[in-house]
Amino acid sequence: MSPFSELPCWVIMKCGDDHKCPAKENPHRDCWDIFSEVDKKAFNICQDCIVYLSRQEVSVLSRQEMEMIMQNKGINVNDVAA
């Protein structure tokens, strides 16, 4: 599992505080579970999402690839991976 697997999805996706989000209102549930209840097709999109990929035991992305994505999103990987 990725060192980012414990981060809330809104941190990984860099959602602002002014962004009303069902995942923020239900922080103990995975975002793809919440959105698949709203839209059954959403899970197809979620399977390509960096949040979903970071939570998988075996990921198609290496740790280095995940770190590069997080750095490009402006997340300090040194603070998260520690």
Image (tube, grey):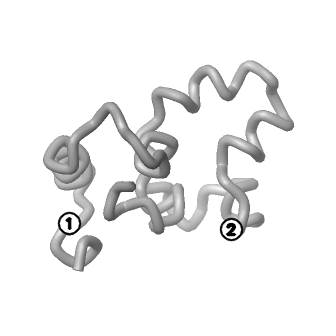
Q: Is residue 42 above or below residue 37?
A: above
Q: Residues within 10 Å of mark 2 (few under 14, many from 20)?
A: few
Residue 69 appears left or right of 33? left
Residue 72 lies, in percent from the top left, at 19, 47
Q: Which residue is drawn at 24% across and 72% down?
A: 81
Q: How crowded is mark 1: few (under 14 residues within 10 Å), some or many (20 or more)?
A: some
- On-image quarter of the C terminus: bottom left
Q: Is residue 49 above or below residue 14?
A: above
* Residue kind at label 1, given as amino acid type: Val
Closest to the observer, 80 or 10? 80
The residue carrying mark 1 is: 77
Residue 8 lies, in percent from the top left, at 52, 64
Closest to the observer, 69 or 65? 65
Residue 42 lies, in percent from the top left, at 69, 26
Query: From mark 1 to mark 2, how far is it between C-alphas?
Result: 21 Å
Element type where label 2 sits in the image: loop
Q: Residue 27 carries which label?
A: 2
Q: Which of marks 1 and 2 is nearer the N terminus?
A: 2
Q: Residue at x 73, y 19 (%)?
A: 41
Element type where label 1 sits in the image: helix
Residue 16 appears left or right of 65? right
